Amino acid sequence: MRLTGFEAIEFAERHNLPLKKHGDPVDGPARDLSVAEAEALADGDEGLVYLDVPDDQYRDAAPASFQPDR
């Protein structure tokens, strides 16, 4: 499954995965982007950022919340 934009960033952040970037007219493709780098790129063009996740890994991923545990 290919996730793109902020959906990819959120999944990568929750599961500690590196992100990728499609090439654009200025720069070529990039791999192993941090969440911060991906967010900066996505602010300009959300479609540049992506994450490929095996279907079963995506389906079986534990739900995560950024809400503090109480």
Image: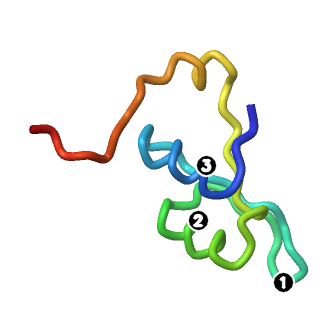
Horizontal side, residue 25 vs residue 17: left or right: right
In the rendered image, residue 6, in percent from the top left (x then y), is placed at 60, 57
Q: Is residue 25 above or below residue 21?
A: below
Quarter of the image that includes the C terminus = top left
Binning the other alpha carbons within 10 Å of mark 2 as few (below 14), some (14 to 19) or many (20 upward) gives many
Q: Is residue 25 above or below residue 5?
A: below
Residue at position x 55%, y 68% in the image: 39
Query: Marks 2 and 3, Cα distance to the nearest angstrom?
Result: 11 Å
Horizontal side, residue 15 vs residue 23: left or right: left
Looking at the rendered image, the disc whose residue lies closer to the viewer, 1 or 3, is: 3
Query: Residue 37 got which mark?
Result: none
Quarter of the image that includes the N terminus = top right
Query: Marks 1 and 3, Cα distance to the nearest angstrom?
Result: 24 Å
Could you tell me which secondary element the residue under label 1 belongs to? loop
Horizontal side, residue 46 vs residue 68: left or right: right
Residue at position x 56%, y 53% in the image: 9
Query: Residue 7 got which mark?
Result: 3
Binning the other alpha carbons within 10 Å of mark 1 as few (below 14), some (14 to 19) or many (20 upward) gives few
Looking at the rendered image, the disc whose residue lies closer to the viewer, 2 or 3, is: 3
Please name whichever residue, 63 or 36, is drawn nearer the observer in this view of the structure: 63
Query: Residue 26 got which mark?
Result: 1
From the image, tell me which residue sits under label 2. 38
Amino acid at pointer 3: Glu
In the rendered image, residue 18, in percent from the top left (x then y), is placed at 55, 49
Could you tell me which secondary element the residue under label 2 belongs to? helix
Going from N to C along the chain, the mark reached first, 1 or 3, is 3
Going from N to C along the chain, the mark reached first, 2 or 1, is 1
